[in-house]
Amino acid sequence: MQQEDKALKDRVREIPGLQMEGEDRGILTLSVGPQHPGSGHFRLIIKVDGDIIAEALPDPGYVHRGEEKMCEYRNYIQNIPHLERPMIADSCGILYPYVLAVEELLGIQVPERAKYIRVIMAEINRCIFELYWLAIYGIFLGHSTMFMWPMADRELLIDLAEMASGARVTHAYFVPGGVRNDIPDIFVEKATKHVKYFRSRLKEYESIFYANPLFQARTVNVGVLRREDAINLGATGPVLRASGVEHDIRKAEPYDVYDEMDFKVITMKEGDSYARAYVPWLEMYESVEIILQALEKIPNGPVRIKLGPNPKGGVAEVFKRVEAARGELAYYIVSDGNPKPYRVKLSVPSFRELPVMAHLLKGAKLADMPSIYWSMNYWPVEADR
Amino acid sequence: MATVSEFRFSEFVKSILWLLFWVTLVVSLIVLPIIFIVLFYVPEPIIDGQRINPYLLLTMLTNPQIGAPLIKATMETTFFKVVVLPGFTFAALFATVLIYAERKILAKMQLRVGPYHAGREAFWWANSLGGFLQLIADLLKLLGKEIIVPKGADKPIFLAAPVVLIIASAGLVALIPIAPNWVVADIDVGLLAVFALLGFFPLTALLASYASNSKYPFIGGLRALYQLISYEIPLILSVLGVVILAGTLSLTGIVEAQNPYWFIVLLPIGAVIFFITALAELERIPFDLPEAESEIVAGWLTEYSGMTYGLIQLANYIKMYVLSALFVTLFLGGWSGPQIASSLEIFNVTLITAEEANGMTWFVIKTLGIAILMIIIRGINPRIKIDLLLKTAWGKLIAVAFINVFIAVALLYLGVVTVGA
């Protein structure tokens, strides 16, 4: 009987994710994901000491698609649609630095109107992405209304994006040399109307979500990321700004016409899950401001410079980065003079949040895991590329 | 190859004659003797001083003008009370209305439409009642699903749990008075019985989760137990004030004791605590920890499928009706309210008196109001954390519940109210 027990224990120990390590200390290894309802295509190996997380080891790579290698087999134009795939919720954001880098490589001057359209579309996409993220944050914490409201308001902005590009989510709208097509005549009027309505809707989120004492109880002082840690661990985007670091590529290294726009960089000092949820909400106001300014200033003219069928640059290396909705997104392109790039390297914000997540989960309670995990703005598909 | 037998008229007639023969034989030799024996031995009932013989019964069934006393007599039987009016059918109908109201109200809050198409085109009057047949569609869907018992599950306990929950909720329904004299079981310790029956629910959840032989249900069951520990004491303490003021544990007595003032006026703190803990008892948002779908799939309900799941949901909604009704009974004066309804009469026979009809109307209005408040709270809150629930329940709710008890005692000693009003 005892032998059977021992054999069973040995068998159990062999199951990955169920190992008991140091049985005297009672530390249990749990595996959250890759088939957990909350985690997405991503595994988090957690060692728990009772209710406290002793160690969290992120285990990405379940949805690796080889985007970087794929780039080497296509020319600069053919690369556009598949590069959106890692992050279709923010498809303009992930394409933006690629387009900028290729333009620098080919030495193209983009028409003014195209620059404005790009800024408008990038900001619309930022709002679309952050609403999507906020909706899932809501349902992660069991708030069903907060799932429905952002999803419903997101439709308005998706309609706008569809009006400009013809596609609802994966636009493939930015191309080297400008944008794929001009916006329709009614776009400016409609966009002003929709965006102003959206701004009035944003105020409602405050009362139903951010001011809710139960939401505050789950997020305030949970997973506090100090300023120095945020810098040392390489956090980026809203996570970095929620810890009080005023860093935004749109201000620090302006691209296209962001230097002509008047907007603030939102920062908060707290660095907890609540601040990381609050900063994107405030940033949506700034996005609305940018969209309205750009709609006012938008000049007339061409929107695209036609390139040849197989454009190629010289032997060069270019590096471009933008502020996507989740943070700094950079492309590093090496060209050997062929129509196809020699090497394309993506640096995505989701992957850069992983060390931060591991740092924050250590010492946190198991029940705080959902709010910390989701406040990191981590997207497995983007991180695995 | 199948042979097709030729149709012969003579064979057809023969088969019909054989059928007639056997029917005549069975009826004359077996059925008729039984009927006569029954008629001979069972005494004819007397309704309104009139002996009801079978002939009169048939006449009454076809002619409502004569048959009205029969309806009245049926309504006075215990069977009718248990099965139909204050009993299970009423509660199940109420639960159905609650499910529909929940889906529609939550949809309105969340910028959705909710159920819309089912039944909309079927009836001309249903145009404004979007999709009220959706519930029947859902029921048919659940009935059509296979009941899957997981491998290695403790089958008897696993399958008994939904039935136990339905029985416990039916037992709760029997204790709720909906109008003067309209209660199935008017027992002296009604409130005690309510809490005894309420204790079944988390324990059944734990048993069901243990019997499921699956991880997520087990976590859900343990969470149900944690929740029980946290809310049960404040729930009972919040009711203690009411019992002190009413001087009785009988629910009818408590309603009658709220004659000049409803207890929500005298004990507002107790009412708030009871409402919060009732939400925890119902496992509704913000206290839906045992069923938290983004954390532990569906909690202890994960392995249930088909009608077993349907029965658990029905039991939950009946429990929601019961707890709303209990709140109304304990704090909102039960059935009392200004006279608005008239009596229900058929051919000069009063089926429900004006007073009783008024009681039922007010009871339904108040209970629906409380239930809708619960639905709205579900729409505006996220889920609470388990440690916060325990901390709040033990650290704050119990302390405040004791203050509530002291207020009740003080009211009694200062002579603001007298025991039993």
Image (cartoon, grey):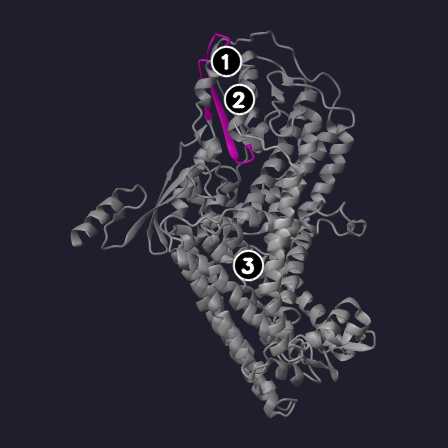
Please indicate whether residue B186 sits to the left or right of residue B305 in the image.
right
Instruction: For marks 1 and 2, give the CA distance.
Output: 10 Å
Query: Which amino acid type is shown beneath numbered disc 2?
Result: His
Position of A378 relative to B337 (above/below): above
| Chain letter, disc 2 residue | A
Residue at 62% over, 84% down: B253
Q: In the rendered structure, which disc, 1 or 2, sits on the residue that comes first in sequence?
A: 1
Q: Main secondary structure of the magenta part?
A: strand
Q: How crowded is mark 2: few (under 14 residues within 10 Å), some or many (20 or more)?
A: some
Q: Please say if A363 is above or below B239.
A: above
Is residue A328 covered in magenta?
Answer: yes
Query: On what subunit does the disc labeled 1 rest?
Result: A
Q: Which amino acid does label 3 sit on?
A: Pro
Quarter of the rendering occupied by the N terminus of chain A:
bottom left
Q: Where is residue B122 in the image (x, y as percent from the top left)?
A: 76, 47
Picture disc at residue B86:
none
Q: Mark 3 = which residue? A: B286
Residue located at (39% from left, 51% from top): B215
Magenta highlight on residue A46? no
Q: How far apart are marks 1 and 3 (CA)?
A: 52 Å
Residue visible at 64% across and 73% down in the picture: B81
Viewer can see residue A277: yes
Number of residues whose C-alpha sits closer than 10 Å to that of mark 1, classed few (under 14), some (14–19) or many (20 or more)? some
Q: Quadrant location of residue B403?
A: bottom right
Q: What residue type is labelled 1?
A: Arg
The reply to whether label 1 and label 2 mark residues of one chain is: yes
> Which residue is labeled 2 in the image?
A82
The residue stretch that appears in magenta: A324-346
Vertical comparison of A347 with A127: above or below: above
Which mark identifies residue A74?
1
